[in-house]
Image: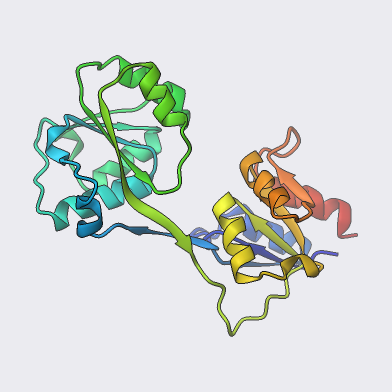
Amino acid sequence: MVKKILISQPQPSSEKSPYFEIARNYGVDFVFHPFIKVEGLSVQEFRKQKVRILDHTAIVFNSRHAIDHFFTLCKEMRVAIPETMKYFGISEAVSLYIQKYVQYRKRKVFFPATGGKLPDLVALMAKHKTENYLIPQSDVHSDEFHQLLEAKKLKHTECIMFRTVSNEFPADCEFDFDMVVLFTPAGVDSLMKTFPNFKETNTKLACFGKATAKAIDDAGLELELEAPSVAAPSMTKSIELYLQAHNK
């Protein structure tokens, strides 16, 4: 029976989160602790890439992290972004987040109608072929974006502005979970670095996404629950169905 579950993400800010409803309905205890965290590059580290931000006419964001660290670096380097700069976001939600730093009425912001898909974002960018795009990224990223941009022959510069690092589990907290839920390959790596003997425990593993599932398999670990699925498109729904079947 599963009674205590570690979710390797930050605790939801809203009490309406499905996690809290599942906790009430099934009597389980959720603990939230990300195994990874994102930190920005220093000005000195960024300058080693020899990227000139103002040489570009458009900035492309595929996450809120990219937005935060782009504007933080610009502020630290005293780079004044011109009114003519265009912004492209992978989704409406990411694009709206730009308002934290700039006013929409003074900027041109674009995002694909079908948010979250890189091919759709690149197709939108291709409609603005004269732009010189800057792509802020994490140190951990796939080659898909690069390949799509090259295929469309878009003028662009990819640069690293932030990185993913391990977020160690508190030493004074007991690691006594019935299930651990992982969401990224980097989270799997961090778990194994923090608990190198993890495979000797009886804790069940759940994950979201094929890449995370592969990382778990590559680590020689056994996966108990994988999402998404036809029956459960979300991690919370997968957990709920699992508890229905096993917590009787």
Quadrant location of residue 122? top left
Q: Nearer the viewer, residue 161 or 118?
A: 161
Q: Position of residue 149 (x, y in %)?
A: 37, 23
Up the image or down, 189 lies above or below 196; here it is above
Query: Looking at the image, can residue 184 be seen?
Result: no
Horizontal and vertical percent position of residue 124: 35, 19
Quadrant of the image containing the C terminus = bottom right
Q: Is residue 169 above or below residue 226?
A: below
Which residue sits at x=79%, y=69%?
Answer: 200
Q: Quadrant of the N terminus?
A: bottom right
Residue sitting at x 58%, y 82%: 171
- Which residue is pictured at 25% across the width and 48% down the height? 70
Q: Is residue 190 left or right of residue 174?
A: left
| Front-lying residue, 206 or 107 | 206
**Where does the image place residue 232, in percent across and percent down from the top left?**
72, 39
Image-quadrant location for residue 93: top left
Please provide percent x and percent y for residue 221: 75, 56
User: Which residue of the protein is positioned furthest toward the bottom in this rendering?
Assistant: 172
211 lies above or below 130: below
Residue at (12% x, 41% y) in the render: 81
Q: Residue furthest right?
A: 248
Q: Is residue 117 visible?
A: yes
Q: How is the image coloured?
A: rainbow
In this orientation, which residue lies closer to the viewer: 154 or 169? Answer: 154
Task: Please give left or right for residue 45 compared with residue 152 in the image.
Answer: left
Q: Along the line of sight, which residue is nearer the eye, 101 or 62?
A: 62
